[in-house]
């Protein structure tokens, strides 16, 4: 599966509007689209036009902005797979239409037949009015749907010539091995149709599940900045894409442009903080949080783990001579080289006695006692 090209759909705008009622203004949406273009994202899922006329206008504005500026990113609109909704989506000027169909679990064969017939009519209608449309359709929660229904729907959509079949773990209930097994089986039932992976984070597995979905044969990754989305969010855009890239997959997004990524994440985080009163970008955020540059155990002191500009060292019973040396250099503190071993042992012992990490004052005191 290595060296395959992966298409990235950034769903920050659409999923982000489902995060605790967060709302993006037109100016904020345009700024987010600009970030996505700078980073080389393939598709921006810009919103849900059937929800309201203003939402439709917002998506239309994003489509126009992208074309006016000759952006490479494609702007997609999402709605239900009905003639009513697809008419609204096409009116925005978007060529990428992301549709969804709600099918109940354990439905009768007759009910499924009728649903697929209606879907076929909708697809034909779209093709008639927008022959160059790029269609993605999501139908089922793969964590709750039975195998025969999944098989039939994927085979049906593949024969319809759909560009992408989105297979969401809507309930966020799956484990990575379960996602892998299901996508591996289903990917063998498609022709030229790409399987798109959309994983929710209810059990904290979204990014891992998304990686395994791609490894199993998915060709499209759906993710968002900071994993923002409905309930506990979806897969994180940077870490998921970077993990796949490290495993040999090809992506257009520039994962080395960390300064722009940090600015993008900080921008989305500031909007969330303004409206919700809490941060998504925090000390423990992988790569972009400060915790990636904090060190306590001596065995980790030589690592390069993230973007933080300043390393922080905490000296307790677990420290090593190397960590102590780095701490002293960071705080411009001097200790004779031949006393460094002794200082390290004194730090360990004092930390054990006090049952806490030592402060800078503590360290200075211990150094003075060595003379």
Image (tube, rainbow, N blue to C red):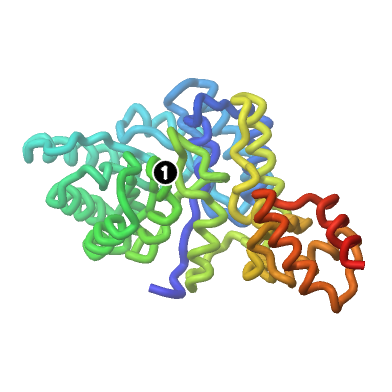
Q: Assign a secondary structure to mark 1.
A: loop
In percent of width and height, residue 13 lies at 54, 37
Q: Which residue sits at x=54%, y=40%?
A: 12
Is residue 261 visible in the rendered structure shown here? no
Compare residues 158 and 207 and report the one nearer the observer: 207
| 359 left or right, relative to 59 | right
Q: Which residue sits at x=57%, y=26%?
A: 23
In percent of width and height, residue 324 lies at 77, 66
In percent of width and height, residue 233 lies at 46, 39
Relative to 36, say whether 181 is above or below.
below
Task: Locate the C terminus and report the quarter of the image it occupies.
Answer: bottom right
In percent of width and height, residue 256 lies at 66, 63
Is residue 295 visible in the rendered structure shown here? yes
Q: Which residue sits at x=59%, y=38%?
A: 280
Task: Locate the N terminus and report the quarter of the image it occupies.
Answer: bottom left
Q: Which residue is mark 1?
A: 201
Q: Which residue sits at x=63%, y=70%?
A: 299
Farthest bottom residue in view: 338
| 86 left or right, relative to 160 | right
């Amino acid at each position: 599966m290595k060296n395959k090209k992966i298409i990235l759909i950034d769903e920050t705008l659409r999923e982000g509007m489902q995060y605790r009622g967060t709302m993006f203004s037109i100016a904020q949406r345009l700024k987010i689209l600009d970030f996505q273009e700078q980073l080389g994202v393939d598709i921006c899922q810009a919103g849900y036009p059937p929800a309201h006329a203003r939402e439709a206008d917002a998506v239309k504005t994003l489509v126009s902005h992208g074309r006016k500026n000759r952006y490479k990113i494609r702007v997609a609109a999402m709605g239900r797979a009905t003639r009513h909704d697809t008419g609204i989506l096409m009116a925005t000027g978007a060529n990428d239409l992301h549709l969804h169909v709600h099918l109940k679990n354990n439905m009768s064969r007759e009910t499924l037949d009728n649903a697929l017939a209606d879907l076929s009519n909708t697809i034909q209608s779209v093709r008639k009015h927008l022959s160059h449309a790029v269609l993605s359709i999501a139908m089922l929660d793969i964590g709750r749907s039975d195998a025969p229904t999944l098989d039939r729907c994927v085979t049906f959509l593949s024969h319809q010539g759909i560009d992408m079949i989105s297979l969401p773990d809507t309930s966020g209930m799956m484990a990575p091995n379960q996602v892998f097994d299901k996508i591996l089986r289903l990917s063998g039932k498609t022709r030229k149709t790409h399987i798109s992976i959309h994983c929710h984070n209810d059990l904290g597995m979204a990014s891992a599940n998304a990686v395994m979905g791609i490894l199993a044969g998915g060709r499209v990754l759906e993710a968002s900045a900071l994993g923002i989305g409905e309930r506990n969010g979806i897969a994180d855009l940077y870490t998921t894409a970077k993990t796949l890239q490290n495993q040999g997959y090809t992506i257009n997004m520039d994962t080395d442009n960390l300064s722009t990524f940090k600015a993008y994440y900080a921008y989305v985080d500031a909007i969330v903080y303004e409206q919700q009163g809490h941060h998504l970008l925090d000390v423990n955020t992988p790569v972009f949080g400060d915790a990636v540059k904090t060190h306590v155990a001596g065995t980790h002191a030589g690592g390069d783990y993230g973007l933080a500009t300043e390393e922080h060292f905490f000296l307790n019973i677990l420290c090593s001579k190397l960590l102590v040396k780095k701490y002293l250099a960071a705080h411009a503190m001097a200790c004779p080289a031949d006393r460094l071993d002794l200082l390290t042992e004194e730090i360990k012992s004092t930390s054990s006695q006090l049952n806490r990490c030592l402060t800078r004052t503590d360290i200075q005191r211990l150094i003075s006692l060595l003379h």
